[in-house]
Image (cartoon, helix red, strand yellow):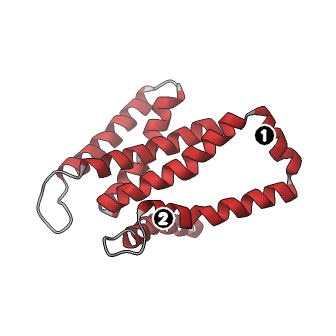
Amino acid sequence: RLGLALAAAIWGGAFVALKILLAPAGPLDPWELAWCRYGPSAVLFLLLALALAPRALADLARRRPGRALATGLLGVSGYNVTLHLAESQLPASLTLLIVAANPVLTLALSGERFTRRRLLGSLLALAGLAAVVLWAPRDGGGWGPRPLWGLAAAVAAGCCWSGYSLLGKGL
């Protein structure tokens, strides 16, 4: 249980850390932050894969190159750039809520059957999300609409993660 609590705290805390790095006076824009977070590790893991599992990497590149590339682009580049764009426009808590709704989207895109329980749970989750997005107070007080660009970027991040999950399933 402690491990789960720690994982949740680290995952949730990442959104706050991103918000600080993306603040107007922050050191990075969304594109730079994505590159700084994942560029070096992408190079490192490619080198490790080439050194430790060259056959598996060659097999993947031969069998499903488009799917492997699309999975990586959606799950790393697409997700993180859109997440950072959303974080630059929205409060971290709202971005987290929108992105955390991606299991509903993944279920919808998966082609799996919506049972009554799944449908009820999905509708409840989306209704709660809509209530927060539409009626929660804005940062700095006051009520009003959210920046459309930030909301679209947060939804796009969830879509990227859903696509990553579905495409990666068959690799």
Q: Quadrant of the C terminus?
A: top right
Residue occupying image coordinates x 58% and y 36% = 166
Q: Quadrant of the N terminus?
A: bottom right
Q: Nearer the viewer, residue 141 or 41?
A: 41
Q: Work out whether residue 16 can be spotted.
A: yes
Q: Nearer the viewer, residue 33 or 123?
A: 33
Q: Residue at 49% across / 37% down in the picture?
A: 106
Which numbered dot is residue 32? Answer: 2
Question: From what the image shows, is residue 145 above or below residue 115?
Answer: below
Q: Pick the residue in front: 136 or 34.
A: 34
Q: Nearer the viewer, mark 1 or mark 2?
A: 2
Q: Position of residue 77 (x, y in %)?
A: 54, 51
Q: Amino acid at mark 2?
A: Glu
Q: Are marks 1 and 2 in contact (CB under 8 Å)?
A: no
**What is the x, y in percent for residue 104?**
43, 38
Residue 4 location in percent, x, y?
55, 63
Residue 16 shown left or right of residue 146 in the figure: right
The residue at the point 53 percent across, 25 percent down is 111
Question: In the displayed structure, would residue 109 be above or below residue 126?
Answer: above
Of 32 and 52, the residue lying toward us: 32
The residue indicated by pointer 1 is 60
Task: Determine the residue positioned at 38% across, 36% down.
Answer: 122
Report the side of 118 relative to 136 (left or right): right
Q: Position of residue 2 (x, y in %)?
A: 56, 70
